[in-house]
């Protein structure tokens, strides 16, 4: 099932990866499916971007200079940002995967990632977000309570 939306209501999927080719290909794929994709070369760039609050899904590399993916995940959590995180990494092991998932990641994908696996993970996150939003609506006014 593809979650297609208009550009005006298009969810923001942020991609944080220090590899330029990974960022570019992920952004292109995301836009093909009707989502807005913003790319960031580092965790710090993402944090300073002003996009944290509107990000509905975060695609996050594990190993990056200065602040790695787990450190960013911890920082976001400690600041009460509940952004669904999909880790995508070439440096995977069972311990890192366990730590990421225990800290709340929704998926842990190993590079090279198939386009279908990535899109499926993003769509699952966005469907869940819409379901959560609908569960918190006042049925009489159709507005969040």
Image: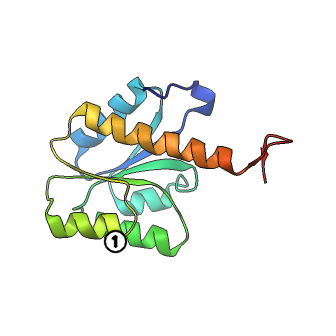
Q: Where is residue 62? Give x, y as percent.
A: 25, 60
- Please, is residue 134 above or below residue 96 in the view? above
Q: Which residue is located at x 70 percent, y 51 percent?
A: 136
Q: Where is residue 91? Give x, y as percent.
A: 14, 59
- Please, is residue 17 above or below residue 102 in the view? above
State the residue position of label 1.
71
Q: Which residue is located at x 44 percent, y 26 percent?
A: 2
Q: Which residue is located at x 37 percent, y 61 percent?
A: 43
Question: Residue 81, can we see it?
Answer: yes
Quadrant where the N terminus is found in the figure: top left
- Please, is residue 92 above or below residue 56 in the view? below
Depth order, front residue of 65/129:
129
Does residue 94 appear left or right of residue 36 in this picture? left
Does residue 32 appear left or right of residue 56 in this picture? left
Question: Residue 66, can we see it?
Answer: no
- Please, is residue 131 above or below residue 116 in the view? below
Furthest residue to the bottom? 78
Q: Which residue is located at x 27 percent, y 37 percent?
A: 117
Q: Where is residue 48? Give x, y as percent.
A: 49, 60
Quadrant where the C terminus is found in the figure: bottom right
Depth order, front residue of 100/51:
100
Does residue 143 appear left or right of residue 23 in this picture? right
Depth order, front residue of 64/133:
133
Q: Residues within 10 Å of mark 1 (few under 14, many from 20)?
A: few
Q: Secondary structure at mark 1?
A: helix
């Amino acid at each position: 099932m593809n979650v297609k939306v208009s550009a005006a209501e298009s969810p923001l999927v942020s991609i944080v990866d220090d590899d330029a080719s990974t960022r570019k290909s992920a952004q292109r794929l995301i836009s093909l499916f009707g989502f807005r994709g913003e790319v960031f070369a580092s965790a710090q760039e993402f944090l300073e971007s002003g996009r944290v609050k509107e990000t509905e899904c975060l695609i996050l590399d594990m190993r990056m200079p200065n602040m790695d993916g787990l450190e960013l995940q911890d920082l976001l959590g400690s600041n009460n940002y509940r952004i669904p995180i999909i880790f995508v990494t070439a440096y995977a092991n069972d311990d890192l995967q366990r730590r990421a998932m225990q800290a709340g990641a929704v998926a842990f994908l190993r590079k090279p990632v198939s386009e279908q696996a990535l899109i499926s993970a993003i769509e699952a996150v966005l469907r869940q977000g819409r379901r959560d939003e609908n569960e918190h609506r006042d049925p009489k006014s159709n507005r969040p309570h």
